[in-house]
Amino acid sequence: MSILQSIQNELNAPKSQRNNFAKFNYRSAEDILEALKPILAKHQYSVIVNDDLQLIGDRYYVKATVSLYDEKMALVVHSSAFAREELTLKGQQASQITGGTSSYARKYALNGMFLIDDNKDADSQDNTQHTQAKPVQKITDAQLKKLNTLMSLKNVDRDAMKKHYKIESFNDFPVNAIQAFIEYLEKL
C-alpha cells in the first residue's frame, strides 16, 4: 500500500483537454493513463482496466474496474465505477455510445484509485439553470371587494367564472387578468 500511496502522490494529470462549447477544461481517462505509465514503470507496478456491461433495471451500465498489480503480478487493490449508456446520442452509433460510456466509467474508476479530485470539473457541477421563485402575487382586498360587488350587480354566474379561470376561490384569481375582468364587468 505504500507504493500505491507513492503513486497517488506522484501522479499529476492536469486538465489539458478543452470543451470550447461549454467553456471548461477536463482530463480524460487517456490523459490519466499517459501520466500514470512512467510512474508505474518506476515502481514496477501494472494497471489493468476491464469493462463489464451490466443490465440494471431496463438500462445498461458499463462497470469499469481498475486493478493495480505489484511486480509479482499480485493484486494490490482495485477500484470500480459505473456509467450509464444513453439510449441514443445524436450523430453517434451504438458502438460510439458504449465507447464513450466506457471511457467515462474508466476515468472515474481511475480517479477513485489514484485520488484524483474532479471537484472543479464541469461534470460535478449542477449546470441546470435555476430561476428564483417569484413571490406568489395575490389580488388585493380592494380588487376582490370590487370583483364581488360587480359580479353581484351584473348577476354573473360565480361557478362558471371559477370553472373558466380554473380556480377554487376568487382569492386565487389570476393577478394578470383581474383588472381586465373588472373593466369588462364595469362595461356590462
Image (tube, rainbow, N blue to C red):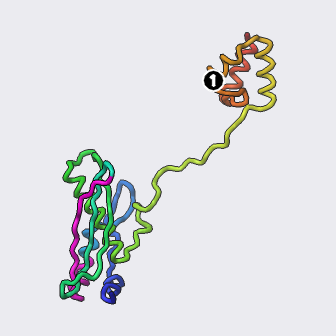
The amino acid on which the numbered mark 1 sits, given as a three-letter code, is: Tyr
In the rendered structure, the answer to whether residue 38 lies left or right of residue 118 reads: left
- Identify the image quadrant of the C terminus: top right
**With respect to residue 113, does 43 lie above or below?**
below
Q: Which residue is mark 1?
A: 165
- Residue 144's spot in the image, x, y percent? 77, 26
Magenta highlight range? 35-56
The residue sitting at 20% across, 48% down in the picture is 93
Q: Is residue 70 magenta?
A: no
- Give the camera-side residue of 35 and 71: 71
Q: Quadrant of the N terminus?
A: bottom left
At a point 70% along the width and 25% down the height, the residue shown is 178
Please state if 26 lies on the left or on the right of 68 as rendered: right
Q: Nearer the viewer, residue 80 or 90?
A: 80
Q: Residue at x 66, y 29 (%)?
A: 174
Above/below status of 141 relative to 78 = above
The secondary structure type at the circle numbered 1 is helix
Where residue 141 sits in the image (x, y, percent)? 80, 31
Disc 1: CA contacts within 10 A as few (<14), some (14-19) or many (>=20): few
For image coordinates 80% across by 12% down, the residue present is: 153
Q: Is residue 50 magenta?
A: yes
